[in-house]
Image (cartoon, rainbow, N blue to C red):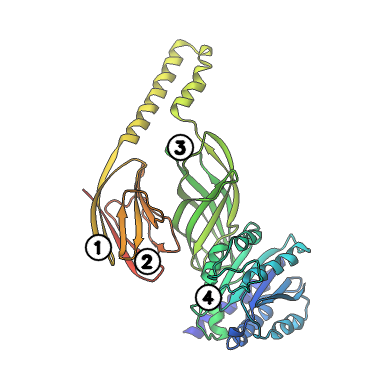
Amino acid sequence: MAVACLLSLVVSGIAYADNRTENIDLFLVIDKSLSMQSKIGAVKAYIDHSIIQNMLIPGDYVCIVDFYGEAHVIYSAVVGKDKEPVAAAVDSIRADGHWTDIGNALDKLREVIDSGSYPDHRKYFMLITDGMQEAPPTSKYYSPNGSFNHAFLANTKTIQEKGWKIEILGIGANTAAADLAKSVSGGFAQVSNNPTPQEIAQKAGELLGVVDASGVQIAPVGADGTSTLSLHLQSTGYSAARNITIGSVSLALDGKLAVQIAGNQAVSVPPNSGTDVKIPVTIRGLSSGSHAGTLTFTFVGGDTFSPAVVSTNVTVSPTGLQIGHLFSRNLWYLGGAAALVIILVLLAIVLVRRSSRESKITFKLTIEGDLKQSTRFTLKAGNEVLIQDTPMGFRAIEKQIADPVARVVFRAEGLRFEVIKAARLTVPTMPTNIMGESLKARTNSGKTIIFHFEPA
């Protein structure tokens, strides 16, 4: 069965490469630290068979960077009919380096991009590593705990904003691959600690397949801060549907720090087809008018879309009273009857909004996990209950806390559950209104938490 699955992947990859008329730019970034000694053979065999021999066509541009504490460009050229120079460059890689400085490798990649590439080519990026970020103390990406520091995260914007297809392959469980994929809004695949070329090919999947995002826009934000984010996703080059889980959507406005406005949205995109997506978002604290900003999407799992960073404009609608003020300045142009109608309409809007703000909902929330809690809450429209991850287990609390992982919010469409820390809690299925529902969530340690919402 595994052989059949691998053959289907290879055949679909060959078919797409053979049918391709547009050339691509491919960037391979390969870990050559000492810990890769038992794995580098399988990695090189996978790259040679699945990518060089069966995917690349003449006219494609290929850049290969190997890295450890340092990073080196070992190949940078356009592929001809003879692919032997590319294969020879890959075969020359030896796992003999100290440290694992992923940030330095991306710096080296930036040098190649800045020196000149092919703007009309679609860009594909794959990074393969078996380790954590372990930069030497002399590196600007050094951090005592191996986390990605600010300099590293700023550097990743180069590939996030350009609509690249980004794939991160982690070898073994103890890698930085998942965190790296999240920081660059890329796809993530993990193989065993000593994989075969076939396992890598199966988990890496169809590298040339892409899901493109277009028409990304946010509807005017209402007085309560709610709006809808719309986009169109188009799949190309895949043989099966892509099940994309958006871990979070963040918005940075007017040069300020990004704030999460939505999370945990699951979307299925049929193969070689498109789908329209609408995501409820919450944007609070903005003044009326138009604001320039940047949307950033992160993903959970291997399926993604690009670009993951998109410029946008957010328009905040005036409140009912502000609208009345705008009309009052020009009422003398209108007849008395028309003016009276407008005043009545505006009054109705104000009353409806006031009624909405004053509406309440009462429910009982039961959390089943390490710590079982069953509590009755009453929320006004726009108010929230925060979910906290404590050493004893998950609990719900109405007061403000420093590091909530999720929240329960009462809005016009009903009671909503929103994940704040997608890296610590995932909810595969998320109804728009959770009243009467039971949500099954999973923590980053693999534990299952169930949230029950019952009318009270």
Considering only order in the chain, which callout, 2 or 3, is on the residue closer to the N terminus?
A: 3
Residue named by callout 3:
222
Distance between the alpha carbons at the discs numbered 4 and 3: 43 Å
Considering only order in the chain, which callout, 3 or 1, is on the residue closer to the N terminus?
A: 3
The amino acid marked with disc number 4 is Thr
Which residue, as the protein is rendered here, is positioned at the far left? 456
Considering only order in the chain, which callout, 2 or 1, is on the residue closer to the N terminus?
A: 1
Residue named by callout 1:
372
Q: Residue 276's x, y, as percent?
A: 51, 52
Name above or below for residue 353 compared with residue 15: above
Label 3: element kind: loop
Q: Is residue 417 among the parts visible in the rendering?
A: no
Residue named by callout 4:
175
Q: Is residue 261 among the parts visible in the rendering?
A: yes
Distance between the alpha carbons at the discs numbered 4 and 1: 33 Å
Q: Which marked residue is nearer to the observer: mark 1 or mark 3?
A: 1
Residue named by callout 2:
442
Label 4: element kind: loop
